[in-house]
Image: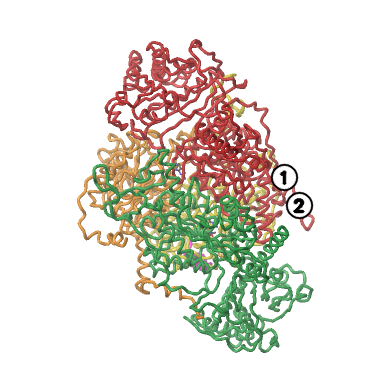
Chain colours: A yellow, B orange, C green, D red
Amino acid sequence: MTDVLDAGANREADEVPATTRADWTSDQEVRWCPGCGDYSILTAMQLLLPELKARREKTVFISGIGCAARFPYYMNTYGVHTIHGRAPAVATGLAMARPDLDVWVIGGDGDMLSIGGNHLIHALRRNVNLNILLFNNQIYGLTKGQFSPTSQKGKVTKSSPVGLVARPFNPISVALGSEATFVARTHDMDRQHMQDTFRRAYEHEGSAFVEVLQNCNVFNDGVFSTITKKDVREDMLIELNHGQPILFGSEKQYGVALAPEGVVIVDVAKLGIENVMVHDETIRNPSTAFSLSRIAKTPATPTPIGVFRAIDRDEFSSSVAAQIQEVQAQLGKGDLGDLLRSQPTWEV
Amino acid sequence: MTDVLDAGANREADEVPATTRADWTSDQEVRWCPGCGDYSILTAMQLLLPELKARREKTVFISGIGCAARFPYYMNTYGVHTIHGRAPAVATGLAMARPDLDVWVIGGDGDMLSIGGNHLIHALRRNVNLNILLFNNQIYGLTKGQFSPTSQKGKVTKSSPVGLVARPFNPISVALGSEATFVARTHDMDRQHMQDTFRRAYEHEGSAFVEVLQNCNVFNDGVFSTITKKDVREDMLIELNHGQPILFGSEKQYGVALAPEGVVIVDVAKLGIENVMVHDETIRNPSTAFSLSRIAKTPATPTPIGVFRAIDRDEFSSSVAAQIQEVQAQLGKGDLGDLLRSQPTWEV
Amino acid sequence: MTDTVDAGPAAEAPAVDEVIIRFAGDSGDGMQLTGDRFTTASAMFGNDLATLPEYPAEIRAPAGTMAGVSAFQVHISDHDITTPGDAPDVLVAMNPAALRSDLHTLVPGGTVILNRDTFEERNLAKAGYDHNPIDGDDLAGYQVIEVPMTTLTKDACKELGVKPRDADRSKNFFALGLLSWMYSRPIEATLDWIEVKFADRELVAAANRAAFNAGHAYGETAELGSQRVVVRKAPLEPGTYTNINGNTALSWGLVAASQLSGLPLFLGSYPITPASDVLHELSKHKEFGVTTFQAEDEIAAVGAAIGASYGGSLGVTTTSGPGVALKGEAMGLAVSLELPLVVVDIQRGGPSTGLPTKTEAADLMMAMYGRHGESPVPIVAARTPADCFNIAIEAARIALTHQTPVILLSDGYLANGSEPWRLPEVADLVPIDVVYATEFNQTNEDGEGVFWPYLRDENLNRPLALPGTPDLMHRIGGIEKEDGTGNVSYSPENHELMVHLRHKRIASIPVPDAEVAGDADADLLIVGWGSTWGAITGAVRRIRTAGRKVAHVHLTHLNPLPANLGDLLRSHRRVMVPEMNLGQLSRILRAEFLVDAEILSKVKGQPFTAGEIQHAINQRLDELAGEGS
Amino acid sequence: MTDTVDAGPAAEAPAVDEVIIRFAGDSGDGMQLTGDRFTTASAMFGNDLATLPEYPAEIRAPAGTMAGVSAFQVHISDHDITTPGDAPDVLVAMNPAALRSDLHTLVPGGTVILNRDTFEERNLAKAGYDHNPIDGDDLAGYQVIEVPMTTLTKDACKELGVKPRDADRSKNFFALGLLSWMYSRPIEATLDWIEVKFADRELVAAANRAAFNAGHAYGETAELGSQRVVVRKAPLEPGTYTNINGNTALSWGLVAASQLSGLPLFLGSYPITPASDVLHELSKHKEFGVTTFQAEDEIAAVGAAIGASYGGSLGVTTTSGPGVALKGEAMGLAVSLELPLVVVDIQRGGPSTGLPTKTEAADLMMAMYGRHGESPVPIVAARTPADCFNIAIEAARIALTHQTPVILLSDGYLANGSEPWRLPEVADLVPIDVVYATEFNQTNEDGEGVFWPYLRDENLNRPLALPGTPDLMHRIGGIEKEDGTGNVSYSPENHELMVHLRHKRIASIPVPDAEVAGDADADLLIVGWGSTWGAITGAVRRIRTAGRKVAHVHLTHLNPLPANLGDLLRSHRRVMVPEMNLGQLSRILRAEFLVDAEILSKVKGQPFTAGEIQHAINQRLDELAGEGS
Ligand SMILES: Cc1ncc(C[n+]2csc(CCOP(=O)(O)OP(=O)(O)O)c2C)c(N)n1
Ligand SMILES: Cc1ncc(C[n+]2csc(CCOP(=O)(O)OP(=O)(O)O)c2C)c(N)n1
Ligand code: SF4
Ligand code: SF4
Ligand SMILES: [Mg+2]
Ligand SMILES: [Mg+2]
């Protein structure tokens, strides 16, 4: 067992053997509905990890319950399919115990924003080294079609037969309100963008939160098609690129600019390119990122994708470990006999 | 029982008898530590409710567990001291069942942001008609001094003997990230400000979230004294007043202004009063309010108090009730016999 | 929508007293719908019946594989029956996977009807066959009817202009037509239903109609004449019937309880299989003033139900095992607050996520003990799908008249299974009397009226004063409180008093005496609870028909237990408790009555068959006879 | 820090064999500290002892009221004792509220030492006295020693320049000095302790020292000579001793288990009374590589412990009843995953929030059954404060060697109570052998090595392969899985197999046989578990000393039960089970062994006294004698 844990230390030492997608594919039959957006996310991941030169034995997928949460079964890595909503909690313990691992957390909008909302926001606040992917299909897929906390107001579902009354969360806003250090959005129709985003998440030290817009073609088909379909993307997806002006549209004719009430979409020709906002992921104040998260009011209006925020901050597990190391450096490793004698003792 | 529920309907009809603080004071001995900030919050509430011409029998305090959560026992109203973290959930059910009541939710930073964080953000998202007061003392008082999710990084407590590793939530940011329609902050050293703020919360239709900075003189004494003590307030508290430029300091020499990375504190003389931000609670986009919530980085730097955001939006319980009324208006009140025959039947 | 139907044109076909048919195919093949329509037609024809839908675990498995098989078993008869049948007489297999997965359930010599078109290489491989079973020995000993259902359906649809791919989706109606012919089912109701259901998709309606007619005609023309039989009407009690599943019955029972008590129904729930349908059903009934609240999790769901109950609603929360495990702390609060609350647990296979779509009854002990401290709650259990209606009312009645959370246990089998239900007269349902306090009930030292929220009546129950009631303002909470005043109290004596009071007031809730079915003087007593009722009853009938004696007691109330139960248990030489767990009721009986109650356990995610219980009874009777001699 | 102390100057004082002293005062009066110091001095002197701290419920009550009374009872003796005593011989009452609340606990004729200065109008009123008890009949029948402690303390401090208000805070040291004189306690250790404790607050140290000396001198000078006695050393087994409370012992036991197993200790916890001190204590021991994680709630706490355990740590979660009620679902996950996990429940008064600072032992049934489905877990319980050390190791040993969650039951009485503990030799502690898989354990159809996470060994346990182990990548989850491969499986047969395997592997965990204390041939057997050990043992000793026969079995393992228990139970005419609940172990014994085990219940938030159990035993013995004759 010491070997296993120490293997982490030597990780950089040995060369990582080259792998292919097949190496990352488990022997389990994939059991999502034909056409489900989850397939393309799985593919993106299975293609990315070989590129990252990740080690399969050092990679763990932790999930809750839901269609999305079946993900770990299909990865030829370590994996735990836990219980509904609790994946961030289980993953936090694992990441703390084993800083040598790459821990991915996978869950749906119900799993991580409904029952698991609290664990999610606390993991983000703590900045635990987790790559958290929330597959947002704005519905409960596995339980066959109830609304979720990201479903749009008015939505008719099995549990809202005359239309949903409540307004949804904006997952990016929730994450930013919870002090997340890395916040991004991507979607299941663009494999390259997913890979780029997942790569960034992987490289981030601390909690990386990625919302993946995902189509549930059985219970919520086409909910993102107004923005993610190939032919509308240019006009409807606002790609955020660090250091670049935020422009979109077939001619890059639209841009994003600061306004008193937050950032707004502007006509570049009218406003002048020099007034278009240049995206900076690294601003420590999350206000601008938050403002960007508010551009899209529904999944049918232009929506930013890419990395909203990516800042450096002490990672939780390593800070915890550092405290332990400091104490041990100061006091030496604990001796059980001494501990037992640490209160007043007497001899008989 | 019909009488009781109907009493709500006639509420406006009868004149509300004048009450005094004594009428709102229960016969139970108050059991907080001498000097606890909770006393002044209690006083503020007991003084405010007579002014509001509220009815005692229509007022319910729902709390979780913690020192703060003892609050209901001391109010001569209806009250339920529930379990740790669940007050927003219980209150949601009550508010939905009884739109005629004024439901207040009281809890500490542990109760509502640690174990109860998820219920809080969902109540805010739904915009249920609750007045939610979070007594933030940045500590677990009742369990005698562990850190809470609002405790500052580095804080030494019983459960963080060599200093707390994680960064805190900013309750205002959390609330705004959760779509809260009313978000405010006040503190236990200023009775008038508390009353003004609680009054606004009371008048708001939907979830009103108020963070009350509260001193726990036993386990976290003076944590807010750098900003709330009488002699420093002018310089350290930034009062937000709707329609007014955001100014503070003994000479109103400081102000708040928009900057690319969010709002910042400025020297009025240098920047010119005309560039100081005029506070507008009613902007629907929460970005500016969020930005304001980020001004104070620790409880020792200038901190905005007052109402950050107050917008109108469909209240949850009444929307739910409206759906029922609509269906009933359309179909008439349900008949049980018809229900039983609503599937194919046959005679034997 | 009451239809009267006659026996139809097939009156001349030979009669059989019952038949068990199992429709099996891919999840995408519409087997649940097919089974459901066949059931409805049979119900309306006048048979007694029972159904067992079985669908794959939550996730949608790859088409054509064993994991993707969805089945629906229906038992129809000319007499009173209680189970969906031990083993089907007929298996309709829409693809090789269905055949492979379900053939073993068929009775020896039974009939297999298969869709010939699907038995080609790709599908055979997906099903895991390395050969074609039609050509091998697999089907030896069965009667096999091969029908090219896909082809025939497509042919029938061709002239309608339906694309072949779309026509393929109608092949289940072909099967339904064929089976309707074989069992002489009335066809009008089905054709009408197609009309209504697909009213806004005319082409689909036409295709389904064409497929159904083609299937029906196929029986006539394909020399299957010898297969045609009729199952005559069962001598059911006169009345209006509907075919109902457990979750619908339960939902309606909750609506009924709301009407009977005059309290608005508030459901706080979080979706979970197999309980979600109650949330769906109740969400549809806003005309009854029902409020449904899909909460962020199970704890919020029960919390909101408690809040609503405190406000004067009938507060209900519905879930399955994992949800109940989460609600324990909040239920303890309701115990301490002494507030009415109905907690519905539609049990499924456990532990943990377990087998979400499969049935089990292993949550009884959690219902009894799944809370910290001494935290007693009444428990009731439904025995048949239709019984869920009564039990929902009973649970609400206990909750509202004794100010206590009540746990109602159903299970996946009852939830989705159905049976004909003779509709009760609404006027015959007993109102639930709910009284709220409106006046002071005590005088303080100064002679002023005051309200004591924990002043107990003769049943040890406390008065509930709803918020909004003038003058009766008071505070309650989960901390121990003084009996009477309800003030927080840490007194040792008071705590002991309250622990005993809470225990006693639940233990003394009146419940009807247990009734013995079968032979009161039998050596062997079978004690059951919940959905085992059907299988036990079926078994007991068979045993007695065979001339042996056996007694059966079925418990509706699991806490408190009927007062006469101990005597009943002791008046038989041997007691056996069939349970879908490892022996939970039997442990309770042993602890309570020191009776050597023996478990007959089945934990396979499937209900007992009558045959399994019959076999176990015969074994015990043989042993007893041996001992006796 | 080992001190050796001799009997001191009071050797000539008359000896008594034991004394029970109760220090009582306002929460602000420092009674816990006073009791603690007196205890330490007595321990170091060589007495056997047991303590019972009692503090008000969580909230800080108004000063001077009954609700604010804090007390500390200590029992010191020259022989082996097992309880903090039935009724104190001496009550030290620092204010009227303390007198009023605790006087009734005193033995008839006992001694009351009171702080005269506090018996003035305001304090009397706050305590609810309408007269001064010193002047009334209240104290008739007791020996009363009135001491103006406040005045004398202030006087003693005056010359030090301590403000009177600050001096007032030292009056508990006056009381401690006085009692130290009365019971001839060594004083050096206390004076040293003051030095160290208040090292950085010199004036406080000086005030406390002055007050202590003044109290000690007061005994000498105030003609209290006749009160002076000595309680001689107890003949304890030779060794190094420390005085330890249950929560500290438990924390150290967990550290020891980590050392013995070579696994890092990971504690996921959420603060809750009376368990928080374990979190506090373990947070201090980073030198042992202990990671403590204060989670956002109890579910996250157990979730993180499961995650850490999966990663190769010793995963532990600590809480009290309400927390366990929340952890049920996650514990079910650990059952299904078959992962090691220790769940510590420091029981308190319930249901719901209940009596957070009071003791109770009513979570046994929840430990057994508080999860959905068949979800068995081993359960162990500690019997004394020091025993918490052993039990923590035992719980970890079972968890780590059988890959299962284990529930450890302690309670508020053990958690805060203390006793002298002979320190074990570290070398004598038995290592915990943990083996992780590092190699393939199966060959697939293609002859390649594969890893099957649910391939069982002869104890039915599965291999654990830690993430990071090359090649052994595999997936586990809470859905039912195929035995062997661990793949998701919905097969009925496999599910039944797994349910039985999970049951059997827990049921067959080897636990030591139960041992009988007392008379093996007695008619009456007392069966206990947990913290009742002290009171039962004390009672059994008294009964036997009085010449009657009684047997005592105390269970450490509650699931599975010792193999010989059934025979033991059946070999006595009568079985009585004292429990701080309404009969939870007795129900288990009844169900398991069909033995008429009778409950002796106490649910007052307080431990049994030996006298209460002695009384009940005598009653039963009388009845048995009657029957026998
Ligand atoms: C404690 C608990 N509550 C409820 C469920 C039922 N359940 C399973 S998945 C799910 C939600 C699925 O939605 P989402 O998380 O959005 O995932 P998706 O299926 O859409 O990918 C629910 C409610 C459960 N398994 N456990
Ligand atoms: C389920 C549960 N977990 C833990 C506790 C213990 N507990 C009581 S109050 C509290 C936190 C108190 O802190 P906070 O909410 O900030 O309130 P404060 O006392 O500071 O006002 C905790 C952890 C409990 N009562 N119930
Ligand atoms: S239900 Fe929706 S989310 Fe789930 S597998 Fe099917 S398409 Fe995908
Ligand atoms: S512990 Fe702190 S918050 Fe609690 S009553 Fe005392 S001072 Fe107030
Ligand atoms: Mg989803
Ligand atoms: Mg607090």
* Quadrant in the rendering for residue C291: bottom left
Assign the C terminus of chain A to one quadrant of the image.
top right
Q: Answer whether residue A230 is magenta in the image.
A: yes
Q: Is residue D602 visible?
A: yes
| Label 2 near ligand 1 (CB < 8 Å) | no
Instruction: Give the residue type at disc 2.
Output: Gln
Assign the N terminus of chain A to one quadrant of the image.
top right
Label 2 marks a residue whose chain is D
Q: Which residues are magenta?
A: A220-239
Question: In the displayed structure, does residue B29 sit left or right of residue D228?
Answer: left
> Dot 2, crowdedness within 10 Å: few (<14), some or many (≥20)?
some
Q: Quadrant of ligand 2?
A: top left
Give the camera-side residue of B247 and D511: D511
Q: Answer whether residue C317 is magenta in the image.
A: no
Give the camera-side residue of D61 and D167: D61
> Dot 1, crowdedness within 10 Å: few (<14), some or many (≥20)?
some
* Quadrant in the rendering for residue D30: top left
Instruction: Give the residue type at disc 1.
Output: Thr
Question: In the displayed structure, does residue C308 sit left or right of residue B197?
Answer: right
Horizontal and vertical percent position of residue C64: 67, 70
Residue with the mark numbered 1? D438
Q: Is residue A198 visible?
A: no
Q: CA distance from mark 2 to mark 1?
A: 12 Å
Element type at mark 2? strand
* Quadrant in the rendering for residue C282: bottom left
Horizontal and vertical percent position of residue C331: 46, 52
Residue D185's place in the image compared with C216, above or below, is above
Residue with the mark numbered 2? D442
Horizontal and vertical percent position of residue A56: 66, 50
Element type at mark 1? loop
